[in-house]
Amino acid sequence: MSDVIDGLVDREYAYGFHTDLDTDIAPKGLTEDVVRLISAKKQEPEWLLDWRLGAFRHFLTLDEPAWPNVTYPPIDYQDMHYWAAPKPKGPAPQSLDEVDPEVRAMFDKLGISLAEQERLSGVAVDAIVDSVSVATTFKERLAEAGVIFCSFSEAVREHPDLVRKYLGSVVGPRDNFFAALNSAVFSDGSFCFVPAGVTCPMELSTYFRMNAAETGQFERTLIVAEEGASVSYLEGCTAPMRDENQLHAAVVELVALDDAAIKYSTVQNWYPGDAEGKGGIYNFVTKRGRAGARAKISWTQVETGSAITWKYPSVILQGDGSVGEFYSVAVTANHQQADTGTKMIHIGRDTTSTIVSKGISAGRAQNTYRGLVKMLRSATGARNHTQCDSLLIGSECGAHTFPYVEVRNDTAEVEHEASTTRVNEDQLFYCRQRGLTEEDATSMIVNGFCREVFDELPMEFAVEAQALLRVSLEGSVG
Amino acid sequence: MLRIDGLTASVAGRRILDGLDLEAGAGEIHAIMGPNGAGKSTLSHVLTGREGYEVTGRVTLDGADLLALAPEERAAAGVFLAFQYPVEIPGVGNMYFLRTAVNAVRRARGLDELDAMGFLAEAKAHMARLDIDPAFLSRSVNAGFSGGEKKRNEILQMSMLEPRLAILDETDSGLDIDALRVVADGIERMRGPERTMLVITHYPRLLELVRPDRVHVLQGGRIARSGDHRLAHELEAEGYKPAVASA
């Protein structure tokens, strides 16, 4: 295997192009004026400006978290733009035909043809470039079912009561450093509301694209499933290749009322930086859901991109009998660093949670699983099962596991299994003897390792995830 | 046909194969026997291109220089090894693995790839003959298989891949008599004019079910003695020492 794995050479990042869009951009820097400017640009109501300002003032009192198992030079929060938007050419588009052709061409290049999506795939897409939503497909058909799916800005305008009721109800504006920052300067994002008893008739999807340089992206997603409702939501992300690091600090809030189900799947492929570790996205994200009685929240993530990933999609199991799931594949290659995992907070009786985490490290990458399972005194009969597997490719990478378990109820059961393995020479030789190239063999073995997580992804995403995994590990052998 | 001339193989300066010569014609089954440590498994590794050996000498299959090829290129040229210890690959479906292997080899030979339906039909026919449960295909490659199931899986792969040179490395070890019959049957069915087979074994009992055209005794890193199938019985009666002493 020694000449099989000599560390990672260049990996191809297929989405690294930059599109010349005429962009409306705020001056660099983070001040109360910038917060007011963003709110004004978006013609927001007074209460939302106050909400932002409250978050901003709290943010100023916080320090950036130092506990993650990652290292990076200090971020200068005054040296970036907090607002960038493709300039509209005329009034806001009423249909896809009116979307700026350059924006459409950019999404076509990403393999997400907005028009095709609308005609063929049956997946509703909200496309977000830098700070703003540029198109949402399938709105009429969703509206017939009573489902609201639109950009966050539109939701603020059209459904202010719903936004006001649920915004910050799971991740408060003072939750943590990055969540407070997001709350102050968030630009856009997606909003989804599924009324009681309704099963959303199609997969919903948001596609995030960072385009402008030296710009942070701060989007906010809020999904509400009322009693007995259910929805499956997909999220995809890419960015151009740039030498400087770019900050992405998003917040996702999920509200699943009694008997509701929300499935949230992410394929995160932000630009990871080059082979020497130059450039790439800092992906500092807060994702959390709150589950009512018998409700189910399921996070599935495939994290292959970003220079640094810091995220812990979590579930607060508030209602009795609620269910939380976290299925994760995190791939780090070259100089990438990931500190990711989940938090399962058991409050209700007979709540159950499942954690399956697969970390893959290649090159000089460091991959950390950090997970908290907390059983409160009220969580009688609660159960958790955690399975945490690490796969190493090569000898210069690292895998780390930090499981935290807090149990305050004697009847609660917590199980934790962990393993660390290498792609071994026997497996590679067996595959090659059967005619597979070394690269195909590695890809097959790694895909097999991730199987349990990929099985949780919606079909079209599972295929994309496997392809992505292959690209991510390209050059890690041979 | 397979031709081996003056083959040597060393690991960290220790010579394991020491000038091995062997010729095996198309349509023939040759048994390779020998005591532990004689270099039987090393021979199978060197013929299939496993890394970690310093190799000299010459090996050709139908005139092509095998030693110059990577393992997957040898597979494409028709070399197949039934592993002594088949490897587990968790999470990779047996059917997916087998179809990928068959199509990789077909592609290399300039044949069309088999589609999922065509492959499944063919696999099921082979499995019925090998007395393999169809549920086998949806399990992960060798993961949690019993010893006998693993060996049958190797024979299934061999039948599907239709090699020019099949090397069976102690495929009979650890099998009960029923499984041994199925495996022997699978080998016997593969006998044909387009194929050379090397059956590496410790025990003559497999050779009662699969009659070899030639039996070779590998000892001290080279072929110490060769004969027809009766040699296997002599060895059983007398052990390896006299067989070599009389060579």
Image (tube, coloured by chain):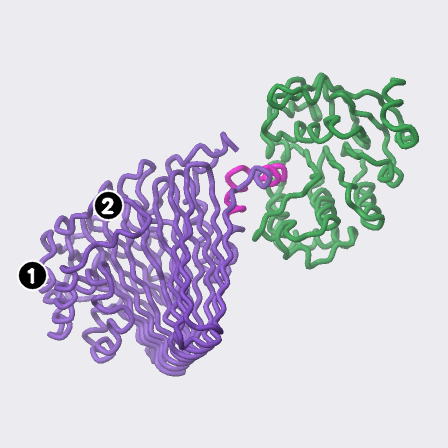
Q: Residue at x 71, y 16 (%)?
A: B6
Query: Magenta segment: does it hold B16?
Result: no
**Vertically, is A66 above or below A460?**
above
| Visual hue assigned to chain B | green
Residue A416 left/right relative to A96: right
In percent of width and height, residue B40 lies at 74, 29
Q: In the image shown, does A103 or A285 lie closer to the viewer?
A: A285
| Residue positioned 47% across, 51% down in the render | A466
User: In the visual, does A450 lie left or right of A136?
Assistant: right
Magenta stretch: give its range: A429-446
Residue highlighted by disc 1: A33
Give the side of residue A302 with respect to residue A39, left or right: right
Q: Name the amino acid, label 2.
A: Asn
Snapshot quadrant of residue B72: top right
Q: Colour of chain A?
A: purple
Q: Residue furthest left?
A: A33
Q: Main secondary structure of the magenta part?
A: helix
